[in-house]
Every structure is written in structure tokens, then in C-alpha cells.
Image: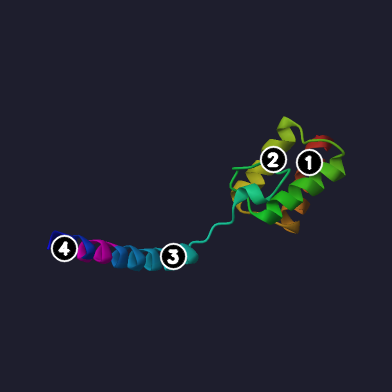
Amino acid sequence: MELIISVILAFTFLVLMIIMFILGYKEALKAKVEDPFVYQNYMIGEGWEKDTFVEYEKIIDILGREPSDEEMKIFLDLVEEGYHGDVLLKKFLEKVNKSKHH
């Protein structure tokens, strides 16, 4: 009798685990987040989107070096304001050129 009860309980827990997995999997697909470690040679953990990383690499290519502290502050301010993609690059270059002339 104890064996039958333990098998029934084990089966019940197995069924409940499968149901919870399916429900959790649906929710996980809704809020899917790409793994930041997929992007190699980028600043991991900054919370940037992929196009922001691409623009950062373009800035390094244009400058021929890593951005200075002041340039990095400008870049991070623009990212925080919500700019990304080509608009981010354009705004960054405008602000850097403006700060160099003053």
C-alpha cells in the first residue's frame, strides 16, 4: 500500500513539474533576453543593445583609439538618452567636434 501511495505521489509531482515548466517556458519566451556573452569583444554587462555595441566599435575605428573619459561620458549620456544606431554615431560625432572647437 505504501508503495502505491509513493508511486501516485511521485507521478503527481512529475505531472505538476511538467505543467509548471510549460507555463514558465511560455513566459520566458515573452521576455526573452539575448545572452550578453554571445557578443565577443564588447563591454559585457552594460545593458546595451547590439546596435549600440556596433556603433561603439565604429567610434573606435573612426577615432583610431579607445574614447577618452570625456568622450566616453558623452557616449554614455547619449545612450542613456535613448539614442542608438546611426543616430547615436551622428550625435556623438557632432558633440565631440563641438567640444573640440571650444
Q: Which residue is drawn at 70% across and 56% down?
A: 51
Residue tagged by mark 2?
74
Quadrant containing the C terminus in the rendered view: top right
* Location of residue 21 with respect to 72 vertically, above or below: below
Q: How far apart are marks 4 and 1 (CA)?
A: 73 Å
**Residue closer to the observer: 57 or 76:** 57
Q: Distance between the residues labelled 2 and 1?
A: 8 Å
Which is nearer the N-term, disc 2 or disc 4?
A: 4
- Foreground: disc 1 or disc 3: 3
Q: Of the residues shown, which amino acid type is indicated by label 1?
A: Val
Q: Residue 25 carries which label?
A: 3
Q: Distance between the residues labelled 2 and 4?
A: 66 Å
- Secondary structure, mark 2, is helix
Which is nearer the N-term, disc 4 or disc 3?
A: 4
Q: In this view, does 100 lie to the left or right of 41?
A: right
Q: How far apart are marks 4 and 3 (CA)?
A: 30 Å
- Secondary structure, mark 4, is helix
Looking at the image, the residue that sits furthest to the left is 1
Q: Which residue is drawn at 69% across and 52% down?
A: 52
Looking at the image, the residue that sits furthest to the top is 69
Residue tagged by mark 1?
96
Q: What stretch is highlighted in magenta?
A: 8-13
Main SS, magenta residues: helix
Residue tagged by mark 4?
5
- Categorize mark 1 by other alpha carbons within 10 Å: few (<14), some (14-19), many (20+): some
- Secondary structure, mark 3, is helix
